[in-house]
Amino acid sequence: MRDVRSHRNALHSDGTKCKEGTASVPARFVPCCETFANHTTACELDVRYEWWREKRQWVIAIAESAGGGGIRIAHCPHCGSRLGSKHAS
């Protein structure tokens, strides 16, 4: 995960670390649209997209305080583009 803003030390009210301002994306990530790109750096209590390298898939991240994990997505929920090699090199 790379830090894209200085928000990385913020905590939620329950004491869990906030991921806002960080991104879990492939090294040569090219977003399909601006909205998708913005959600890669969102807090996991909002709608956040992450690339899970081990599984080679995009997911909608679920906050640890809500059980953790992710929901696999194959297409951008905003523009409909297929998420794959162009978005995960």
Image (cartoon, helix red, strand yellow):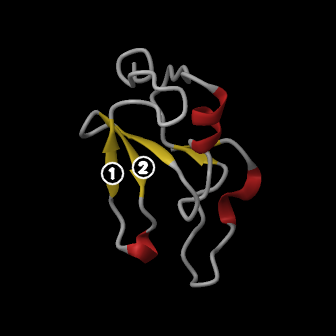
Q: Is residue 24 left or right of residue 14?
A: left
Q: Is residue 72 left or right of residue 25?
A: left
Residue 60, label in figure: 2
Q: Amino acid at mark 1?
A: Ile
Q: Is residue 25 left or right of residue 59?
A: right
Residue 87 on image: x %, y %:
45, 22
Residue 11 on image: x %, y %:
64, 73
Sequence-wise, the earlier of marks 2 and 1 is 2
Q: Amino acid at mark 2?
A: Ile
Q: Is residue 68 above or below residue 70?
A: below
Could you say whether the residue bearing mark 1 is in a helix, strand or loop? strand
Q: Is residue 3 left or right of residue 66?
A: right
Q: Is residue 22 above or below residue 16?
A: above
Where's the C terminus, which quadrant? Answer: top left
Name the foreground residue: 68 vs 46.
46
CB under 8 Å between discs 2 and 1 = yes
Outermost bottom residue: 14
Could you say whether the residue bearing mark 2 is in a helix, strand or loop? strand
**What residue is drawn where x is 33% and y is 60%?**
69
Q: Could you classify mark 2 by the number of other residues whose Cα lies within 10 Å: few (under 14), some (14-19), or many (20 or more)?
A: some
Residue 8 on image: x %, y %:
66, 58
Q: Which residue is mark 1?
A: 71
Q: Could you classify mark 1 by the number of other residues whose Cα lies within 10 Å: few (under 14), some (14-19), or many (20 or more)?
A: few
Residue 48 on image: x %, y %:
52, 50
